[in-house]
Image (cartoon, helix red, strand yellow):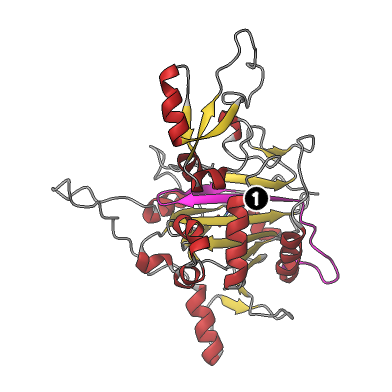
């Protein structure tokens, strides 16, 4: 489900797969000169719903396209619904630039910290301070194992005994042999997910309450509760118990899936987009149903509750080119010297934080 390449021989088999393939990033291979930079294949975006322009024209003249309506409920900004998809809510530009920057930083610095798990756990065990290590060009070095020491029962143990080292220190010790290493910047680029609150076990596809975990930070809980309100029954409050943070770089996609491991599907999943613009596909209850495509920009919030939770959905594409990424105001806000490291990351990345009530 979470892979950078969901397309194989079955790629044309369902309507969902066909649409994924339509929007997925492919490079044109017709450029003869190898020196010429590969060009992304042109893609027709005319059918992609754009809630930014819908929201702008609504603000000017109150007009909405057929099939889109504004939720008649007290909220501090317009919430849009699709007439054919009850339980789906789109809140354009819901997060301020300040909030976006804050959650980008947290997603990179604190969310991947143990006991929160990341996709790196399986290969390397718990890794501390990844972002800082990448910023300071460190390498993760596997310590030479003591002969006889058996760590083979530990599934997370390949690099169990590891430490950060400066590249220079590592270069000079490499001659000693028996030393495996990987740079923090490569590990940061390969970070695909981290989990907050109750930890999700991807191998068993369930929440594992026995895994050590911290509560979702209060500020994120408060934000999620506020954002979830349009999808909640009057008088009920959303209880954020787990969150999955997805990290996308150019060419990454999130294949069509359902999130079905939570007990009460009437409760929304609160999904926040940060960084580069993406295409989100909202399908039907079967992969054979033709999905709708829509843009997701930094600061947009999507809620999926009730019937909408039974719909296949995914992200076939993120845009990292200047014209399409649509992160001008983020770039401006992160242009201070102290923030350059975040800017460098987010210029070619997208982060999605989706928050769930599990029970
Ligand atoms: C998910 C998900 C959507 C997104 O993580 O389950 O659907 O916008 N993410 O990245
Ligand atoms: Mn999902």
Q: Residue at x 41, y 39 (%)?
A: 10
Asked whether residue 286 appears in the rendered view, the answer is no
| Secondary structure at numbered mark 1 | loop
Q: Residues within 10 Å of mark 1 (few under 14, many from 20)?
A: some
Residue 33 higher or lower than 96, as above or below: above
Q: Is residue 237 magenta?
A: yes
Residue 201 located left or right of residue 246:
right
Which residues lie in the magenta part?
231-257
Viewer-closest of 231 and 35 = 35
Viewer-closest of 166 and 205 = 166
Q: Position of residue 117 (x, y in %)?
A: 65, 40
Q: Residue at x 37, y 70 (%)?
A: 46
Picture quadrant where residue 154 is located: top right
Q: Is residue 62 magenta?
A: no
Most extreme residue toward the top is: 148
Quadrant containing the N terminus in the rendered view: top right
Q: Position of residue 250 (x, y in %)?
A: 41, 52
Most extreme residue toward the bottom is: 61
Asked whether residue 249 appears in the rendered view, the answer is yes
Residue 40 located left or right of residue 280:
left
Residue carrying label 1: 110
Q: Position of residue 291 (x, y in %)?
A: 50, 58
Q: Residue at x 17, y 45 (%)?
A: 34
Residue 47 higher or lower than 107, as above or below: below
């Amino acid at each position: 489900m979470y892979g950078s390449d969901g397309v194989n021989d079955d790629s044309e088999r369902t309507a969902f797969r066909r649409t994924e393939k339509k929007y997925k990033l492919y490079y044109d291979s017709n450029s003869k000169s190898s020196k010429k930079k590969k060009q992304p294949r042109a893609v027709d975006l005319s059918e992609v719903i754009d809630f930014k322009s819908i929201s702008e024209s609504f603000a000017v003249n109150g007009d909405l396209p057929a099939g889109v309506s504004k939720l008649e409920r007290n909220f501090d900004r317009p919430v849009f619904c699709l007439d054919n998809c009850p339980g789906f809510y789109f809140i354009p530009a819901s997060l301020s630039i300040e909030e976006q920057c804050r959650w980008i930083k947290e997603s990179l610095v604190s969310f991947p910290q143990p006991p929160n798990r990341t996709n790196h756990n399986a290969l390397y065990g718990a890794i501390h301070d990844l972002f800082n290590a990448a910023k300071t060009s460190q390498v993760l070095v596997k310590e030479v194992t003591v002969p006889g020491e058996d760590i083979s029962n530990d599934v997370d143990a390949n690099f169990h005994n590891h430490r950060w080292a400066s590249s220079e220190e590592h270069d000079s010790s490499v001659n000693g042999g028996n030393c495996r290493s990987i740079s923090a910047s490569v590990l940061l680029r390969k970070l695909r997910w981290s989990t907050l609150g109750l930890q999700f076990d991807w191998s068993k596809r369930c929440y594992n309450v026995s895994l050590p975990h911290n509560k979702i930070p209060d500020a994120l809980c408060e934000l999620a509760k506020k954002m979830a309100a349009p999808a909640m029954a009057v008088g009920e409050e959303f209880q954020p118990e787990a969150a999955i943070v997805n990290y996308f770089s150019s060419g990454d996609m999130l294949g069509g899936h359902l999130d079905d491991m939570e007990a009460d599907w009437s409760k929304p999943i609160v999904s926040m987009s940060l960084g580069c613009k993406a295409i989100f596909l909202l399908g039907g209850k079967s992969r054979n149903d033709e999905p709708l495509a829509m843009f997701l920009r930094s600061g947009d919030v999507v809620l999926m509750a009730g019937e909408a939770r039974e719909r296949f959905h995914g992200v076939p594409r993120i845009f990292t080119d200047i014209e399409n990424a649509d992160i001008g105001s983020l770039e401006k806000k992160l242009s201070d010297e102290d923030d350059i490291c975040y800017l460098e990351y987010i210029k070619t990345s997208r982060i999605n934080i989706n928050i769930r009530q599990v029970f």
